[in-house]
Amino acid sequence: MKISHCAIGIIFCAAVSSHAVTLYVSPQGNDQGDGSRNAPLASLARARDVLREQAQATGTPGGEIVLLPGLYELSATVRFAEQDGGSAASPLLIRAAEPGTARLSGSRRLAPELFQPVTAPALRAIIDPAAVDHILAVDLAAAGIALPTKIEERFRMPFALPELYCDGQRMDLACWPEDGWATIEKIIDSGATFSSGGAFDAANPSKARKVEDRGGIFQYSGDRPARWHADRGLWLHGYWCFDWYEQVLKVANIDTATRQITLSRGHQYGLRQGNPSPRRWRAVNLLEELTRPGEYTIDCENKRLYCWPPAPPATARLAITVLRGSVLHFSKTPHVYLQGLVIEEGQVGISADDCDDFRVEGCVVRNQQREGIRVNGGNAARVVGCDVHDTGTGGVNVTGGDRKTLTPAGHVIENCHIWRFAVHQLTYASAIALRGVGNNARHNRVHDAPHMAISLSGNDHVFEYNVVHDVCLAADDAGALYKGRNPSCRGNVVRYNFWYNIGRPLGHGNAAIYFDDGDGGEKVVGNVFFRCGEPGKGNFGTVFSHGGHDNLATDNVFIECKRPLGSSPWNDQRWRTYVESELWQKRLLQDVDITSEPYITRYPALVGFMDAQPSAMRVNRAQRNLLVMSAEPSSGNWQLDDSNWQTDDDPGFEDIAKGDFRFKAAAAVFQRIPGFQAPPFAKMGLYVDALRPVVTPVPWTHEPPRPLPPLPKRAAPPARPAPPAGTPPLYKVRRTNAAPAINGVIEADEWAGRLAADAMPLAKNYNGAAAARSSSAWLSHDGEFLYVAVTNPVAATAKLDGATWGDYDAVECSLQALPPAPAQPIHIFRSYGNGVIEHRIAKDGAAEPSMAPASPMFLYAATRPRPDLWQAEIAIPLASLGLDPARNNRLAFNLTVRKGDDNLWLMWAPTGGYSYNVAAAGIIELQP
């Protein structure tokens, strides 16, 4: 639009002092020219050098670089240093002559003649017969394209390989399945487990177990992997344990006879069933699966590119990325304004370190392998009116401010449209990240991502007037906005945003706003939520607090949200554990000091935070919230006063069916909630200005909201059985100086000879009746871990391929401190014959167990050495459960084996009812 370009040009020109130099650059220019409009330079780097020379000669900083229309292919980062910056009166302005017409690209077109058909018989035999005649090969060494000497065996996406584009569209690394994921049929061996994924282990890194880096083994279904050649290098991308963390692992071996794949390295959290949904995986970058247009693969060893171009190389721009860093990088360069540029096909679009008054205005940043825009340090940076999309590991990431002094940086992300920002790294790759102190993101639109959209870390940030939708679409235990694990980071405000279509039901649960692992002191004000959050099997809500307190939710509107407010609170013991942990001691007393100024003045709730608070009221509060057509209002420690209103009727929206959630002047909500402040719905999202002359309305295609039925309630358990008469059985657990290897192989020398006399017998059904097919267990401890080994004779036809309690064979360990402290739960570890283990908790022996909100780093392995026998080994960390053998070496305990074919619930101490009712079971005593 010519008028818009003219308006923006006026703004651009006004930013430059009349004394500054203006240089022109053109793809058809010459670096020997004078930089005038008629004799433009050829490169941005040369224009930078000319301005640097001018500033040194005249003492006047800054200047203007005007990029004329065209494509600028860059093979190296264009770097700007401190001496290249401007001043407040004379900034350095780098702009497109017309917005959107100057493209700075980190890719190079591959000459059409480089593309050759595949003729080698050995290669043609590998490629799919239906595709082989469409595949073209490029000798990258001959083309001068550098490749890594090797690809790591374990990494997070993206691959350390160049990307291939066809006319500006990213081509895909060949993979299988072509769309979606395959699922693991059965876990054979969990491999190395470096961390449980629970907050306790992350908070105590020095206590991490040293384990051999050993890859896991799993069984697949179907016969597709029989086509693959692991000896050529084969990598699998998967959610190996949790649905909030994926990783790429190299394949060591494929056994097509048993349909088993062995991985070459262990996964961060082990090959385990960490979340309820099936474990997902896919094969990536393999020639055998190059089967459709728009795909490619790179053979690093032979330095070859293979692709099926969607258009002929003679007419299309088939370009490969060659720039291995930021397209533009600024270091301590003050007063820089970038305007109207297109930055594409690099690794990071724009990065700025320690730059004051750094502005990116009206730019398009797209097709980056990693982030779009990264600002680290400095003050008063502004990213305004930009489009950022199709990036690999995030959109716009800003960090600034001093957390020790709580001095704000004042960075702003405003009126930006950010979408498809997690193309490669599918988890923890956010559209907007605010870190440090006092930064703001407002009036942005964010959408289309498998996991989170917004990351907050730090203090006193404001996230306001944004629209966030269609995120958390392929992840579990996730939030569209996520913040956590550092209670010194507080004072943040999330207000006046519109959230809709957030989350998918995968099992554990997800939220629109997720304050995790003790996070507190945050405000959620005046937001509108439509169909957000999934309670799952836990306490999740649309706004969810895990462990934290002192959060406030006020004047929010929840429309057809199953549970608007959810929380999973921590008890006193767990709070004490985390406050005393290595990580929190560092974060709360060393990185900053929350016991002194300015923290205790800015955040009065932190006074006494580090002290024992056994009777503290740890709650979150909700006031004047409107809950429309929701299933239930809250869970956990949310306190809702009488000012909140839940209704199944239209409370007075302008048009509830068409998604117009403004309120009519006479809306019922104003009578039902005195003092209710209606969210400024019309102001949320993008707005029209000179940098964004057009905002296209988003069609509202969602079905009108309808009242939700109550969330399903668990059936009331039977009455708690009375403990059996007499003294409970006692088992003395010997101390060991050599921890057994948890590999499912019960070696006699690891278990003191595996003597029958030392075994814990598992010979009686839950009702005390003798069983024909019994099991045996051996226990030991080393002061840190309780070790359990169980041998289970079974029918030779028994199936061990499931992980549902009661339906499949399993071993259950249940334990509780003695005497039980207030709110001290029963910990229940259920381990299955297929290698899956889950950690549940129950408040007592009559309560239905629920998934533990955060699990310690337990280890588990199961094997089936012969058809009629399977074995299990478990290591349970005691301290992370709040159990200290040095203070109290006695635990209420039961061990249960479920044998499906025999319909047995074998127990060490039959309870007559629930197996985990340890009050009716026995006692173990950990020997010194």
Image (spheres, rainbow, N blue to C red):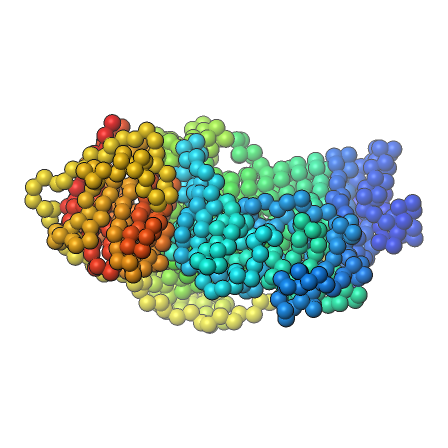
Residue 400 visible? The answer is: yes
Q: Position of residue 363 (x, y in %)?
A: 70, 54
> Relative to 255, is 324 on the left or the right?
right
- Relative image position of residue 157 (x, y in whole percent): 57, 50
54 left or right of 270? right
For image coordinates 32% across by 62% down, the residue present is: 711
* Left or right position of 89 against 568: right
Q: Position of residue 849 (x, y in %)?
A: 27, 52
Residue at position x 59%, y 45% in the image:
152
Quadrant (top left, top right, bottom left, bottom right) of the C terminus: top left
Asked if residue 671 shows in the view, the reply is no
- Seen from the viewer's position, the closer of residues 545 and 234 is 234
The quarter of the rendered structure image containing the N terminus is: bottom right
Q: Residue at x 45, y 67 (%)?
A: 653
Q: Is residue 777 above or below residue 525?
A: above
Question: How many numbered discs, if any?
Answer: 0
Q: Answer above or below: position of 575 versus 140.
A: above
Location of residue 97 by image quarter:
bottom right
Give x and y (percent) for residue 472. 49, 57
Residue at 86% from the left image edge and 37% from the top image edge: 54
Query: 918 left or right of 10?
Result: left
Query: Of all residues shown, which one is farthest toward the left?
Result: 725
